[in-house]
Image (tube, coloured by chain):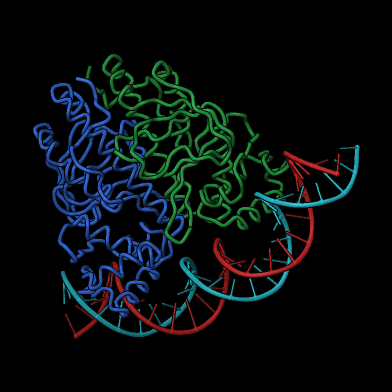
Chain colours: A blue, B green, C red, D cyan
DNA sequence: CGCCGCATTGAAATTAGTCAATACTCGTGG
DNA sequence: CCACGAGTATTGACTAATTTCAATGCGGCG
């Protein structure tokens, strides 16, 4: 009945690059029970799910589509904290108000959970509490990876890391779908839309990726892309 | 007996800038019970507490001194994820291995808790689980603030934000002690040591701060510094 | 067909980084 | 008590990466 903070999944520690993504998938199954207290919400592209500072009464899970979390500086500079893809949870936290604004990148379907109900459910299924705790820990681990990227990586390393991360999360091998704009990618990586565009072009010219339209990239030379992501 | 994820502290939501720092202090009291399962550890300046990838068997709390968490890119570029000051917890997570290396910035005293024992203690004191959960949430909230800083702020805004954050955490009003080197500050903010130095000199010349030796700064004009931190 | 929004490309400007020299500081030993 | 020296910090000059500003191009939709 107590939250077991040191959950043991019976798996060996994942490779560094798998840390968050691998864990995330593994935990999703445990959380199916949550859906009994969830209701479905849909948003059109660019609509807002909630605003930074709103009283945080819900958790959300993405079913289809993509959501971004963002924060603004007073002069309009924007930062995107994360993209949420199908299966990802949004706003898992005990903080009283939302820490960021959440917007639909595409038309999106979500499940919405009332926090109060989730807390009750945890009383009956203590594993659920453990799972939520683990997911917040994963979020922290992803955030640390992202801080390293934002603080110390070059534009090329950032883009390479981003493409590999998206490929990992989408689980379609070397095919990467980019539902967001270049500006969104820039605001996620701490770059301008022009630099994102130029860097993608450069990777394409070097034969490391191929580009289909604007929303799809194929990783042609994964090894080189991985080396680039790590600054080698 | 269940982890209450939506803890209610009975306080109004703190000001945005107080989010993490204020919360941290508030929760420390609850965690006093932990000390019955803790043992004391001391480190000399520059010694390592644990390495990234080590099996994570302990949590730590800083008693005196300062600790930094860091990660390296293969070519030696370094990023400091956080500085831990007295009262701060290190490595709160359920991840199986440490996600970063932790090193002593100064001579340091810590309390070390065996994770297994903490889990047992939570069985007897469910509030403790709630507290740890809240602390991880705080960490996530700080990380989001830091990502905005790393991705979207200028050198001047970064330094201004850093000084204000340190002042907040040290709780000595406008007096800020900087136990770490300029290089450490740079690696925390995504800058070089030279840029940190130049920016501090510039703030000093503008009369926003005064500098005593290399380890102490006084905030002379807090309002201007706050405007700078927010990019105004 | 012609917008409209987004992406791409180019050129100039700027910020922060790099490389190099000099100056502090603090602890130690003469 | 002062001089020395190692480790940092500061400052300067130059370089490079990224941003900014400005066109131009492309694609989907009414």
Quadrant of res A118:
top left
What's the residue at 34%, 65% (across, down)?
Answer: A159
Q: Does A215 sit left or right of C21 as displayed?
A: left
Q: Quadrant of the C terminus of chain A?
A: bottom left
Percent from the top left, x then y, of residue A23? 22, 44
Q: Nearer the viewer, residue B198 or B194?
A: B194
Q: Is residue B225 visible?
A: yes
Q: Does B174 sit left or right of B52 as displayed?
A: right
What's the residue at 37%, 67% (across, down)?
Answer: A193
Location of residue D2 with respect to A229 vertically, above or below: above
Location of residue B131 with respect to A71 vertically, above or below: above
Q: Is residue B144 visible?
A: no
Percent from the top left, x then y, of residue B102? 46, 40
Q: Nearer the viewer, residue C6 or A202?
A: A202
What's the residue at 71%, 47% (across, down)?
Answer: B207
What's the residue at 22%, 37% (across, down)?
Answer: A59
Q: Nearer the viewer, residue B108 or D17?
A: B108
Q: Does A38 sit left or right of A224 as displayed?
A: left
Q: Quadrant of the N terminus of chain A?
A: top left
Percent from the top left, x then y, of residue B182? 61, 49
Percent from the top left, x then y, of residue B89? 43, 30
């Amino acid at each position: 009945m107590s939250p077991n903070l040191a959950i043991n999944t019976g798996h060996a520690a994942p490779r560094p690059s798998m840390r968050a993504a691998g864990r995330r998938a593994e935990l999703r199954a445990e959380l199916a029970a949550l859906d009994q207290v969830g209701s479905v919400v849909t948003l059109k592209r660019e609509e807002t799910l909630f605003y930074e500072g709103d009283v945080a009464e819900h958790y959300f899970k993405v079913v289809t589509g993509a959501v971004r979390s963002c924060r603004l500086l007073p002069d309009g500079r924007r930062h995107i904290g994360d993209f949420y893809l199908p299966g990802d949870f949004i706003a898992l936290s005990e903080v009283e108000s939302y820490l960021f604004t959440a917007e639909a990148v595409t038309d999106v379907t979500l499940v919405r959970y009332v926090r109060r109900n989730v807390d009750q459910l945890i009383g009956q299924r203590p594993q659920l509490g453990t799972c939520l705790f683990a997911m917040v820990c994963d979020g922290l681990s992803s955030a640390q990876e992202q801080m390293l990227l934002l603080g110390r990586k070059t534009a090329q390393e950032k883009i390479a890391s981003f493409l590999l991360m998206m490929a990992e999360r989408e689980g379609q091998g070397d095919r990467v779908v980019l539902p967001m704009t270049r500006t969104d990618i820039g605001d996620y990586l701490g770059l301008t839309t022009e630099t994102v565009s130029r860097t993608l072009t450069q990777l394409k010219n070097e034969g490391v990726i191929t580009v289909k339209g604007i929303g799809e990239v194929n990783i042609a030379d994964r090894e080189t892309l991985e080396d680039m992501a790590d600054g080698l």
